[in-house]
Image (cartoon, rainbow, N blue to C red):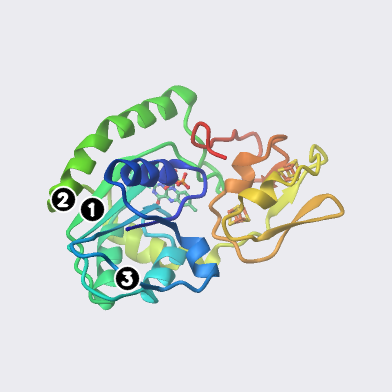
Amino acid sequence: MIFYFSGCGNSRFVAESIAKELDERLLFIPEEERNGNFDYELGNGERLGFVFPIYSWCPPQLVLDFVKKLHFDRQPSYVWMAVTCGDNGGYADRVFRQQLEEIGLPLQADFCFQMPNTYVNMAGMSIDKPEKAARKIENAKAHLPTVIQSITERKSASEMRRGIFPRFKTNVIGKSFHKWVSDEPFFSTDACISCGKCVKVCPLQNITLENGRPKWHDHCTTCDACYHHCPQHAIQYGKATKGKGQYRFPNAE
Ligand SMILES: Cc1cc2nc3c(=O)[nH]c(=O)nc-3n(C[C@H](O)[C@H](O)[C@H](O)COP(=O)(O)O)c2cc1C
Ligand code: SF4
Ligand code: SF4
């Protein structure tokens, strides 16, 4: 069984690739949360995996909040996590490990895929140049068989790319990040054609169309799916996104 979260398709690609190869059940965390599904039955010897992007050197808060509520009828035979990140994840694995331990699950392996950056909501943070993004995707694809092999063999692994000052980034910046996440700066420009794509792609159902224009409803994780998927590039985040490009995993809905 694999639980995953993804805004712009990187983590979805990783989760789907692993699930397909290993014939695992694949569950999208926001959907499970919306449906109030927190109790699961595991088959004999079944593995349990989690795939999500790194947000501010931590797991996304919505992933942690979901895990807190999880309950299984038996212990999984192996527990693993795989993250996607633009650069590095600090001590995000430790935060996730601790959360799992609180519900009685030991984490055996953490895998890490460096993927194109999606975070554009701050000055100085932007998407990768196309060549760099393509290279990261190729490397991630090349890394998949090793990860799948490790999961098949239930191997332990510790792959997190920590970067510099991981303790500070995770514990000081990361752990408070979700408190100042806000969708207030989002707005649409006159380029908007009322297509509704932003409404459709928001994993948290945080957007409605009002008079043909998107309205954000203060339940946002700044995954930036709305920004990156708009066919008119009509969504902006205050002044932070001015002049920045869009990225989503190739062929991502
Ligand atoms: C809110 C937010 C915070 C992010 N923080 C980090 C970070 O701390 N370190 C990093 O390497 N990448 C960071 N990223 C980049 C994403 O982790 C990366 O692009 C990921 O592959 C996106 O996954 P997705 O396409 O499944 O949404 C961040 C992205 C977002 C949207
Ligand atoms: S995706 Fe873009 S063009 Fe379509 S409704 Fe949303 S803001 Fe408007
Ligand atoms: S409103 Fe946009 S940034 Fe916020 S959760 Fe929805 S798609 Fe992601």
Near mark 2 (Cα within 10 A), the count class, few <14, some 14-19 or many ≥20, is some
Q: CA distance from mark 2 to mark 1?
A: 6 Å
Which part of the image, by quadrant, shows the N terminus?
A: bottom left
Rendered residue at 57%/48% (across/down): 224
Residue 64's quadrant in the figure? bottom left
Residue at position x 50%, y 74% from top?
Answer: 36
Q: Three-letter amino acid code at disc 2?
A: Ala
Q: Which mark is residue 157?
A: 2
Q: Nearer the viewer, residue 227 or 36?
A: 36
**Quarter location, residue 102:** bottom left
Q: Which residue is mark 1?
A: 110
Q: Residue furthest front?
A: 44
Q: Secondary structure at mark 2?
A: strand
Q: Earlier in the sequence, mark 2 or mark 1?
A: 1
Distance in Å between CA atoms under marks 3 and 1: 23 Å
**Which circle's residue, 3 or 1, is located before the other in the chain?**
3
Disc 2 to disc 1: CB gap under 8 Å:
yes
How far from the left and from the top, in percent, is residue 182?
Answer: 61, 62
Q: Which residue lies at the image location 41% right of the left edge and 46% below the top edge?
A: 11
Q: In the rendered image of this protein, does residue 174 appear above or below residue 163?
A: below
Q: Which residue is mark 3?
A: 41
- Is residue 172 visible in the rendered structure shown here? yes
